[in-house]
Amino acid sequence: MKKIFLLLLITVNILSCKKNKKTSFVNDTTHEAKIEALLSKMTLEEKIGQTNLRGVSSRATSLPTDLKESVRKGNVGAFLNIMNLEYVDELQRIAVEESPNGIPLIFGRDVIHGFKTLFPIPLGLAATWDAKIVEKSSEIAAFEASGAGIRWTFAPMLDIARDSRWGRIAESPGEDPYLATVLGAAYIKGFQGDDLSSPYRMAASAKHYIAYGAAIGGRDYNTVDISEQLLRNVYLPPFKAAIDAGSATVMSSFNEINGIPATGNEFLLKDVLRDELQFDGFVVSDWDSVIEMVAHGYASDEKHAGELAAKAGLDMEMTSQAYENHLKELIEEKKISVEELNEFVRNILRIKFRLGLFKNPHRNKEHTGNFYAKDHLKEAKKAAIESTVLLKNKNSILPISEKTNVAIIGPLANAPHEQLGTWSFDGEKEHTNTPLNAYQDTNTNFKFAKGLDYSRDTSKKGFKEAINIAKKSDVILFFGGEEAILSGEAHSRANIDLPGIQEELINELAKTGKPIVLVIMAGRPITITNIIDKTDAVLMAWHPGTMGGEALYEIINGIKSPEGRLPVSWPKTAGQLPYFYNHKNTGRPADSTNYIPMDKIPVAAWQSSLGNKSHYLDVGFTPHFPFGYGLTYTSFKYSDVSISKKDINFNEDLEVKFSITNTGKKAGKEIAQLYIQDVVGSITRPVKELKRYQHVSLKSGETKEVIFKISSKDLEFVNHKLIKVAEEGVFNLWVGPNAAQGLKTSFSIKK
Ligand code: BGC
C-alpha cells in the first residue's frame, strides 16, 4: 500500500473554510455587539419567537388577527409565502413599530430558478456549465423577488443527484460534485451580491443539508444510508462552496442519514456545519421536518422532536411549531439551556443585520422588481440556449433553414405553464414564450397540430390531424416530454420514458418518412431507447422557462447553436439507476470484450460462460449518453496533449496543455473537460472525476491551445480514517468532450 501523505492531521479541520473572502461573511463580527445588546433586552418568549418561521397561504385574502397579534408580541421571526404586498408592509410595520424590541421580520419564498422571469430549471442551468449565467439568473431572480418584498430565498438546491427517477433531480446541479461546487458558489454570489444589505439582493439558503439526493431508489424523502467518506467526498463539497461564498442560511433536509434525521443531527449541524465549515448564519428546518422526526421514529412526540432539533443546533423551525409550543418548557426542565436558545437567536439576528433590515426594514416602494424587463428576458433566453443539449443529429439535419416547411407537433409545443417547470409559483403563463409563439412571430412556413393535449394524454383523437400536417411538411418538429408536475418534490417516477402515448405518436409520424426532430422538455433525463431510431435529431431543452420558445426557434433554425452539456448521465432505462460516471471500478469491471448481450446468449449456456463482469445482460454497462456529452453544429478535434512534468511533488502545479481544432464548417463552442483517476488508493477511487473545464469558442478551422493547472490539492479525498489526503502514486488524466471520451496521459505524485 502506498504511503499516505497527511495534508492535514486534524480531522476537524479537514473541510476548513477560506476566510476573509470578499463575498464571504464568515467571521464578520461587525454586528456582534448590537446582537448582544439586543439579546440582553429580549424576553424568553421573544427569543423563541425569533425561531418561528410561519407560513401563510399565498391565496389568503386577509391577514388573520391572531397572526398580527403574534407579530406584535414578537412571537414570529420570519414568514414564507406572503405574496400580498400590503400584508408584507403591514406585518413588517407591526414588527418594527409595535413589537417589544422592534425586530424586523424576514420574508422568504422559493425563488428557485427565477421569480417572474423564469430561467431553465436548475438541472437545465447546470447543463450550461456556465457560472456566469447561473450568477446572472440568480441576480435577476433576487432583483425581481426583492421588488415583492422577498429578501430570502430557499435556494440554491445543492443536492448531488445520481438517480433520474428522483423528481427533485430537476432542482439539482446534477451528479458531479465539482460542477456543483462551481455553480453553487455562483448561485450564492448572484442572490446575495457583495453586499447583502442591498435592497435588490436576497439571503440564500443552501439546501437540503444533506444527502437528500441519496434517497434509496430515487423515491422522495426516502432513507439515506451512506458512509461518511461518501458523504464528505460527494455530497458535502457543494455545501462547503456555498458557505465559503457566504450563504446566509442553510436548510436541513427531510431525510435521515444512517438512522438520524438531518434536522436532529447534532454531528452534521454542529460538528460539521459550525466547527468545520465555520458557518455563522442560521439553519432553518425544511417544511415540518422537525415534527416529521416523529414519523421517522426518532422522536416520541412534538416536544421530543423540538428537544432533539434544539439539541442538534437547529436555529429556526419552518411551519411546524415544536419550538413555539415547547421550548419554554424544555428550558424550564433544563433539557435545553437558555444559552442554546441565545445562540439560535444570535445566528438569526446576525442575518437580519447583514440584510440591513434594522436600517431599512420596509419594502422600497420605488423598487418594483421590473418584472419581465427586456434584459431579464434576454438573459433567460441566453440561459435557455446555453442549457439546450443536442443529443443526436443524424446527417446534420439540424439546423434547418427558416424556409423549411415544418410540422409543429406534440404536447409541449404550446404549453406555456408546463415549460416553466417545477417551482414556478410566480411566473405567469401569459408571459411565456412557447415554441409555437416563436414560430407565429416569424414568417416561417409551419403548420401546427398538437397530436396530444398533454404529456400523459392517452387519447388518439389528435393523431390524424398531426399525421396529415406531417405529410404536407418537410420536417416534423415534435415537442414532447413531461408536464411540469411530473418532476419536482414528491414527483418521482419509476418509469422515465415519455409519458402517455407520445412514443406511439412518434412511431406513427415516422411512418410518413419525414425526418423527425424530437425536442424534449422535462425535469429529468427521459429514456428514449425505444424511439431514438425513429428520430433524426434530439434536443434536450429541460423545462426551459419563460423564453424557451425563442431559444429553441433560434437553435432549430441555426441562428444560435445548442451549447449545453449533460450534467447527469443519461440512462438507457430506469432499471440502470442509480447511474453516475464517477463510480468505482469493482473487482470485475465491465468491458466490451467480455459482454454478451442478452439476445446473443446461446440457449442452455453454461452458467459461467458469460464472463462474470459487472454489467446488465440486457443494457450493458454504459449510459445512453455520458455525463458531459453534448453535440454542436460543428465538430472538434482534440490533439497534442502534454503535461509539464511526469512527476510532481505535493502542492506543485501540473500544467496540462492540449489543442482543440474546430474541424467543421460552422463556428461553435466546445466545453473542454479534464478528468483524473487516482489509479491505486488507500481506499478505492472513482474511475474518473471531473477536475476542470473550460468553454472554448472556435471559428471554423480555428485551433486554440487550452491550459489547465491542477495540483495535489485537486486530488485530495477523505479516506477511511476520515482524513483528507492526497496520495502518492500514478494518476490517469483525460482531456476531452465528455466523461467517456478523451485523450489520455498520466503522471505521478511523489514525495
Ligand atoms: C421543500 C423545500 C422548500 C420548502 C418551502 C419543502 O417542501 O422541500 O425545498 O424550500 O418546502 O417551500
Image (spheres, rainbow, N blue to C red):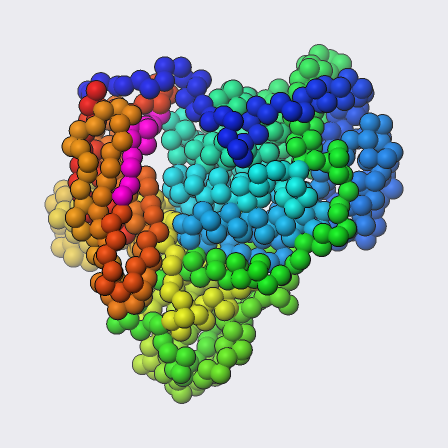
Q: Is residue 742 above or below residue 371?
A: above
Magenta-drawn segment:
707-720
Q: Is residue 567 left or right of residue 27?
A: left
Q: Position of residue 97 (x, y in %)?
A: 86, 35
Q: Say left or right for 276 vs 283.
A: left
Counting every numbered tag in the picture gives 0
Q: Nearer the viewer, residue 478 or 628?
A: 628
Could you tell me which quadrant the N terminus lies in? top left
Residue shown at 34% from the left, 48% from the top? 694
Q: Does the segment drawn in magenta span residue 711?
A: yes
Q: Quadrant of residue 475?
A: bottom left
- The residue depicted at 75 percent of the width and 52 percent of the height is 366
Q: Which of the 4 quarters of the picture holds residue 728?
A: top left
Q: Position of residue 388 (x, y in %)?
A: 42, 60
Horizontal relation, residue 497 to residue 92: left or right: left
Q: Please give the name of the residue rendered at 29% of the width and 63% of the height, measured from the top-left corner.
A: 699
